[in-house]
Image (tube, grey):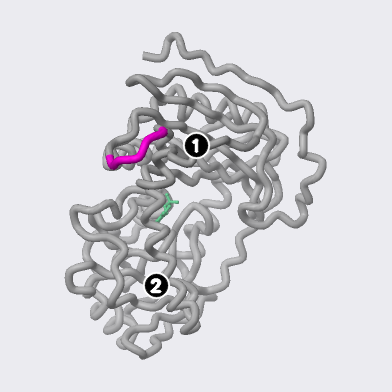
Amino acid sequence: MLETLEIKTKQTENSRLSSVDFENLSFGKYFSDHMLVADYANGKWQTCEIVPYGNFSLDPATSVLHYGQSIFEGIKAYKFADGTVSIFRPDKNWERFNKSAVRLEMPEVPEEIFLDGLKKLLDLDRGWVPGADGTSLYIRPFMFATEVALGVHPSVSYKFVIMTGPVGAYYSKPLKLKVETHYTRAAEGGVGFSKNAGNYALSLYPTKIANDEGFDQLMWTDAKEHKYIEEAGTANLVFRIGDTIITPHGDTILHGVTRRTIMELAEHFGYKAEQRKVSVQELIDGIENGTVLEAFAAGTAATITPISTIGYEGKLYELPPVAGREFSEKVLTYLNDLRYGRIADEFGWNFLV
Ligand SMILES: *Cc1c(COP(=O)(O)O)cnc(C)c1O
């Protein structure tokens, strides 16, 4: 399909790299010199280019601004001690991106644009990949509807973009989560499994209420009964009950690459790994009788963020101390060693640029 679609590169003449304070990287503050931009129209991908990072100009009637056809991904690339740049499991993000695209009636993005294009972009901006422990290059692929017209219908044109930027060590203060028993993030048959912009917009108001009550984030529950645990706002949830590692499952949650990686590692390390429904009651009972040993949020941004406290119906439940959480520490150490190239890549998760 794409034999004729060559990815052209227009290099910047004014690199901003020297203005980056690599000692003080936070999240989402710096953007690398280049971005990849591909345009879809008339039923196919027309162009794909790597160009200097910069603005788009949009007509006020651009369809995404009104009807929200917009999806994205989050991926990280790391630098080994020898300078090799490695992207962590981007094939899984590509697959998920296309599942999101199908659900939002958007075109799928071919491997040549998403994965080959990403490699080409990182090859050009490899100087932007930081090397210090805990740092990485955050990669944000996204696609939005560009048809200029009002009226609800699938757009006839789309823009796919990959932007990147160096990010710092994520300070993982243990989380205090509130079990949400009124508002809903996703219902069965809906779009909860897709990484589409609307899922985040609808989470802001209930999350703000929880923040005002002193919680860091929400623990979403099922839309029907508010009885089963789903996920946190931008991360999946993983629990260790006895020697079993458990994560909720279903189409109302985002199927995280980090979550999947952790479940694969759980089996590798000899734990039992289960994807199943977890009721709030099972969790609360487990905390009270001491069988819930570990709980954390899992996602690309934070990898593993321990949960210290769960609030449910006005009561606070404290989890075991963060120090000494055996499984969490084992996974985190393994993943850091793998991502920075310090151990053999036995699962084939590192995509070298
Ligand atoms: C991105 C995201 C996750 C985590 O997915 P990863 O692939 O591990 O980064 C979990 N939940 C939601 C809602 C997300 O948007």
Q: Secondary structure at mark 2?
A: helix
Which three-letter amino acid code belongs to the residue tagged 2? Pro
Q: Secondary structure at mark 1?
A: loop
Please name whichever residue, 152 or 165, is drawn nearer the observer in this view of the structure: 152
The local crowd at label 1, few if under 14, some if 14 to 19, many if 20 or more residues have their Cα within 10 Å, is: few
At which x and y percent is residue 111? 41, 25
Task: Work out whether residue 8 can be spotted.
Answer: yes
Please name whichever residue, 14 or 168, is drawn nearer the observer in this view of the structure: 14
At which x and y percent is residue 140? 52, 42
Q: Which image quadrant for residue 3? A: top left
Is label 2 or label 1 in front? 1
Check disc 2 and report the residue beneath it: 206
Rendered view: 40 above or below 141 = above
Check disc 1 and report the residue beneath it: 59
At which x and y percent is residue 173? 57, 72
Please name whichever residue, 254 or 41, is drawn nearer the observer in this view of the structure: 41
The local crowd at label 2, few if under 14, some if 14 to 19, many if 20 or more residues have their Cα within 10 Å, is: some
Q: Which image quadrant for residue 92? A: top left
Q: CA distance from mark 2 to mark 1?
A: 32 Å
Residue at x 43% of width, y 39% of height: 61
Rendered view: 153 above or below 109 = below
Q: Which residues are magenta?
A: 148-152
Which three-letter amino acid code belongs to the residue tagged 1? Asp
Residue at x 46% of width, y 29% of height: 114
Ligand 1 visible in quadrant: bottom left
Outermost residue, top direction? 4
Quadrant of the drawing holding the N terminus:
top left
Quadrant of the drawing holding the C terminus:
top right
* 95 to the left or right of 19: left
Mark 2 or mark 1, earlier in chain: 1
